[in-house]
Amino acid sequence: MTYVIGEPCIDVMDRACVDECPVDCIYEGERALYIHPDECVDCGACEPVCPVEAIYYEDDLPKALEPYREDNERFFTETLPGRDEPLGTPGGASKLGPLGVDTPLVASHPKPGEDG
């Protein structure tokens, strides 16, 4: 089990969760943050500090955010646009820094000010 970051994070990326994470498992895409499902230790430190309530324990995801469970995993298991291979399990987000790429679900989300 793991925590999942959903749609409310897109284009907000407050990063308070990153500061609270004791295992450095929250990675930064271009428009959203992603929790690595294998690196997360289920401590829950990230959830209460999220100012937009985008983080949920995967069993508690609201129905409307359920697509983000698989989407968070895809960030690590699929080859994303502009990358040569899947990210895999790098063992910590801080050594990689912002990755500048998102999953298709996040990338297709309307940007602020766009009709959608």
Image: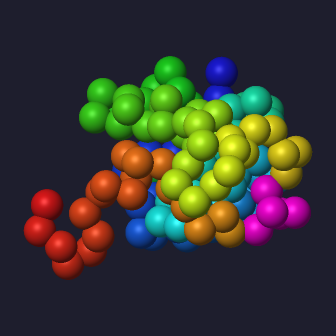
Q: Is residue 74 left or right of residue 94?
A: left
Magenta part, dominant SS? loop
Residue bounds of the magenta highlight: 93-97
Q: Residue at x 28, y 34 (%)?
A: 64
On the image, the x and y values in percent for residue 34 come to 60, 49
Q: Residue furthest bottom?
A: 113
Colouring method of the image: rainbow
Q: Quadrant of the N terminus?
A: top right
Q: Quadrant of the C terminus?
A: bottom left
The relative height of residue 59 versus residue 31 in the rendered view (above or below) is above
Q: Residue at x 68, y 41 (%)?
A: 86
The relative height of residue 5 versus residue 10 in the rendered view (above or below) is above
On the image, the x and y values in percent for residue 77 come to 64, 34
Please identify the quarter of the rendering in which residue 85 is found. top right
Q: Residue furthest front?
A: 84
Q: Is residue 95 magenta?
A: yes
Q: Is residue 84 left or right of residue 58?
A: right
Q: Nearer the viewer, residue 4 or 103?
A: 103
Q: Nearer the viewer, residue 38 or 3?
A: 38
Q: Residue at x 30, y 28 (%)?
A: 63
Residue 44 at least partly seen: no
Q: Is residue 52 left or right of residue 14?
A: left
Please identify the quarter of the rendering in which residue 66 is found. top left
Q: Is residue 32 left or right of residue 49?
A: left
Q: Nearer the viewer, residue 23 or 52?
A: 23
Q: Nearer the viewer, residue 67 or 82?
A: 82
On the image, the x and y values in percent for residue 38 come to 76, 30
The relative height of residue 53 versus residue 89 in the rendered view (above or below) is below
